[in-house]
Each structure stands twice: as C-alpha cells, then as structure tokens.
Amino acid sequence: MSFQAYIDNIKAKTGKTPEELKQAAEKAGIYRLDMKAGDLKKFLKDEFDLGHGHSMAIWLVFKNKGWVTSPGKKNN
C-alpha cells in the first residue's frame, strides 16, 4: 500500500485530512510542537478509532510538515 493510499483511507474512515486532524488535536488541547508520537497515536485511536499504522502515517505528515520537532532538534 502506498503512503498516499494510507492518507486516502484515513480520510475515508475519519472524514478528515491531516490538516483537519491537526486542528482536532489543537482543539482537544493535546497538540504541542514537542508532542510525542504516542500522544498523537492515543488521541487518534480514542477519537477516530485509527490503528497504529494509520496513526503513524499521520505522525509522519506532522513531522514532514514541521508541525512537530524531533527530539533534540529545534524548528526555526
């Protein structure tokens, strides 16, 4: 399965894009620039019933867009 297929399946299941999932995390008060993958994974499981693979695909989007920092690394 391609990465885009993961994102498409997440949209089909939740009705939300990665950007909208970020907004949902912000609204829920769990989003932080220094948040951990496990925090996002738990939120996505609890709120949208996403499994590990789909949650980690969203985490990768968060990382690639600079919405979260890697440990020991600062975003400018």
Image: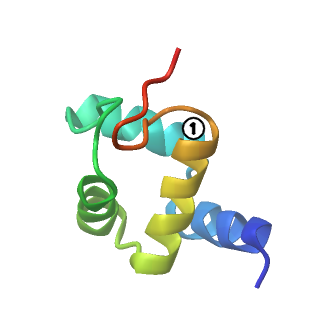
Q: Relative to 69, is 62 above or below?
A: below
Q: How is the image coloured?
A: rainbow
Which residue corresponds to the image point at 51% horizontal and 72% vertical from the top-left? 54
Which residue corresponds to the image point at 56% horizontal and 50% vertical from the top-left? 16
- Give the residue furthest to the bottom: 1
Q: Quadrant of residue 73?
A: top left
- Can residue 53 be seen? yes
Q: Position of residue 72 (x, y in %)?
A: 35, 37
- Can residue 15 be seen? no
- Give the residue furthest to the front: 72
- Give the residue furthest to the top: 76
Compared across the picture, whether 72 is left or right of 14 comes to left
Which residue corresponds to the image point at 53% horizontal and 44% vertical from the top-left? 62
Q: Position of residue 42 (x, y in %)?
A: 24, 63
Q: Relative to 3, is 62 above or below?
A: above
Compared across the picture, whether 74 is left or right of 35 comes to right
Q: Position of residue 69 (x, y in %)?
A: 43, 36
Of residue 70 and residue 39, the one placed in the foreground of this image is: 70
Of residue 2 and residue 20, the one placed in the foreground of this image is: 2
What residue is disc 1 on? 19
Q: Relative to 8, is 69 above or below?
A: above
How packed mark 1 is, by other alpha carbons closer than 10 Å (few <14, some 14-19, many 20 or more), is few
